[in-house]
Image (spheres, rainbow, N blue to C red):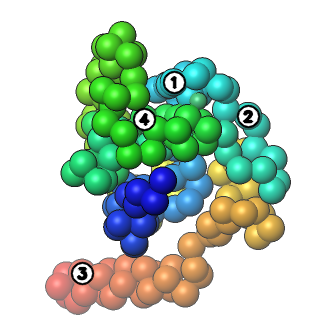
Amino acid sequence: MGRRNSAELFPGQRNKEKRQLWGRYKWRAIERFYQAKFFGLFGHRCFKCGAEEQPVRIGAPPVLCVDHHIPMVLGGHLVPGNLVALCRRCNGKKLDQHPEDFYSPEELKNLAPLLAKQEEFFAFDFDWVAWDKDRGAYLVSLGLSASLVHDLLHDEMHNDFIGLPDPRSKTIEISIDFDLSDLAARERS
Ligand SMILES: [Zn+2]
């Protein structure tokens, strides 16, 4: 009792680390997609008790969260290789315990390959060239479903609405193209 936990000892640090971890996906829809894939590494279950992720319901918090394997008080960060899918209950029980105090040796053995895979899993560079060329095609190429992509681009009521490119930026592209062809024509004459 009275022991201060990581969240209290490092105000702001958690959110900063979260942004660093998930910000690479640039758009909420892509972030959600990769979050779901991340939980997929764990079979969409809590690693400790096996509680299953439930379909998203408005107002209900998700079952699973991303736990710092080595807690912040012990020098761990929210980085690939230190992330475990736990349900809220198990996450609350683990708090700032060292993994060896919370997991059995067998659990730690099973966890090791799931931690090892994470570096590769999070190796993601947002491809702005592909995005600018055709954002719909890019989203589909990442694995988002065509119907979701359609909604993201066209349905303004969608939570993660992205929308189509701003027509003004198209005008700039067109005028640059025009200038270039103009220049080429001048060189030819
Ligand atoms: Zn659990």
Q: Are marks 3 and 2 in contact (CB under 8 Å)?
A: no
Residue 42 place in picture, x, y as percent: 49, 25
- Mark 2 CB lies closer than 8 A to ligand 1: no
Where is mark 4, residue-wise?
84
Q: Nearer the viewer, mark 2 or mark 1?
A: 1
The residue drawn where x is 33% and y is 88% is 179
Gap between marks 2 and 1, in whole Å?
Answer: 16 Å
Q: Does residue 13 appear left or right of residue 41 in this picture?
A: left
Where is mark 2, residue-wise?
54
Q: Nearer the viewer, mark 4 or mark 2?
A: 4
Gap between marks 4 and 2, in whole Å?
Answer: 17 Å
- The picture quadrant where one finds residue 159 is bottom right
SS type, badge 3: helix
Residue 148 place in picture, x, y as percent: 70, 48
Q: Are marks 2 and 1 in contact (CB under 8 Å)?
A: no
The residue drawn where x is 29% and y is 21% is 112
Q: Nearer the viewer, mark 1 or mark 4?
A: 1
Q: What kind of residue is marked 3?
A: Ala
